[in-house]
Amino acid sequence: SIKAVRGSFLDITRTVQCPEEIEGHLRFIKDGLLLIRNGRVDWFGTWADGHQRIPASIRVRDYSGKMIVPGFVDTHIHYPQCEMVGAYGEQLLDWLNKHTFPAEKRYNDLEYAREMSAFFIKQLLRNGTTTALVFGTVHPESIEALFEAAHHINMRLIAGKVMMDRHAPDYLLDTAESSYTQSKALIERWHRNGRLLYAITPRFAPTSTPEQLAVAQRLRQEYPDTYLHTHLSENKEEIAWVKALYPERKSYLDVYHHYGLTGKNSVFAHCIHLEDAEWDCLRDTHSSIAFCPTSNLYLGSGLFNLQNAWRKRVKVGMGTDIGAGTTFNMLQTLNEAYKVMQLQNYRLSAYEAFYLATLGGADALGLAETIGNFNLGKEADFVVLEPTATPLQQLRYDNSNTLIDKLFVMMTLGDDRSIYRTYVDGRLVYERT
Ligand code: GUN
Ligand code: FE
């Protein structure tokens, strides 16, 4: 099947090593044409150069006046925490015990997990997010349901069942053995089934015994092209706890590293309070970081040092981290990221933010050759943004002369109302009404 989409397009044509490089690879086509064949980019360029290639039988989808960008990539989110977003009053460890664990309890029920998977994927799409790296619960049913729903629309989604065999209520615990068997079965059934990918998902070091981390290592060795997804260095009490539980390890990250869980396609959420040696380890192992500004502010966890990540050449993507994070929306997440960086005297530019939310996020997930821009052969996941969704945005837009200013205003004032259409696999999957 062939599709033709017309409008203004913006993307970044290749990955970069520092934010200064981004502008040189920015591609803005004011009147552009995207041709899609079987869910992939078949031709991309200006309308003038391309319109004669459109087969006569094809109706062009015309989004003139809108801004079409690659689908957003959310590199860290929990689907079973929608029920308790905005829970009041606690920081990480108390928040987990008081609000999170009770919410995750219900996902042993496949029917409930199916209902919530449908809800969750709808929220991603109505916020322009077309790829996400997702935490389930300890129950394999949670991931079964989520993958079923993502498979239905052929979404590029990465997810895994939580491995957690201590320091949580009994109803949320597996064992080293059962986490092995259950993760393995899910990998066999879902990993690389269509566009789906599996992430081995120990919740974080405090909730896994050494035996369970060894199981995660074994899974990773048996399935070297799966992902590893966990939390790292989010909260000071958490870090002290890890040091008490694993006194023989040099640092929090050294626990994961010792069990072979660092490496390409290992994604560590938060990484706020890293020691120098931990930064070096992330770099040396080609591990990635998920930067979760709304979560880090909401739980009072701290300010992520993005500048250090660039300096150390550690790849970073944006994460919403629902339900510690407070929004599914990537524009709002970038807006908060800007403020987190302001507090550290670093000016996050609109181009840098846009990179992190698209191609940079894809790169952090090892998918820079697959998604993240409109290069030929890329999977056709994209968003049609409405830059003037509210009267204030309209006024501000009318007083805006440059692309970078327009983009910056979009991320500062934008939200779900800015998401006009979302496409996954070349198909329209969300329309704002
Ligand atoms: N660390 C361990 N589990 C969690 C979780 O569910 N959310 C966050 N933000 N941090 C965690
Ligand atoms: Fe998280």
Image: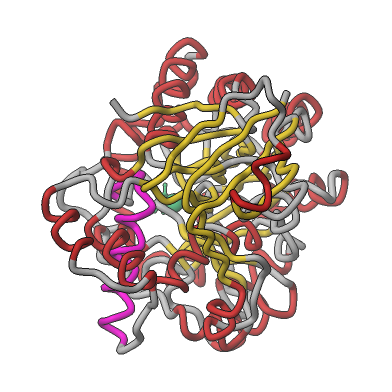
Q: Residue lying furthest top in this view?
A: 111
User: Where does the image place residue 250, in percent across and percent down from the top left?
Assistant: 62, 80
> Would you say residue 340 sits in the magenta stretch?
yes
Question: In the rendered image, is residue 174 in sight?
Answer: yes
Q: Position of residue 188 (x, y in %)?
A: 81, 28
Apparent side of residue 29 relative to residue 90 in the rendered image (left or right)? right
Give the vertical position of 184 relative to 256 (above or below): above
Decide: is 142 above or below 403. above
Q: Nearer the viewer, residue 197 or 394?
A: 394
Viewer-proximal residue, 142 or 19?
19
What residue is rendered at 74% in x and 73% in y?
A: 285
Location of residue 189 with respect to 303 vertically, above or below: above
Question: Who's the residue at 46% across and 46% down the image?
Answer: 77
Q: Position of residue 261 (x, y in %)?
A: 71, 60
- Whole-percent x and y of residue 247? 58, 73
Query: Which corner quadrant of the image does residue 406 belong to?
Result: bottom left
Q: Which residues are magenta?
A: 326-344
Q: Does the image show residue 76?
A: no
Choose top left, top right, bottom left or bottom right for residue 5. top right
Q: Residue at x 37, y 67 (%)?
A: 235
Question: Does the stretch in magenta take in 84?
Answer: no
Q: Is residue 84 left or right of residue 20?
A: left
Residue visible at 52% across and 27% down? 428
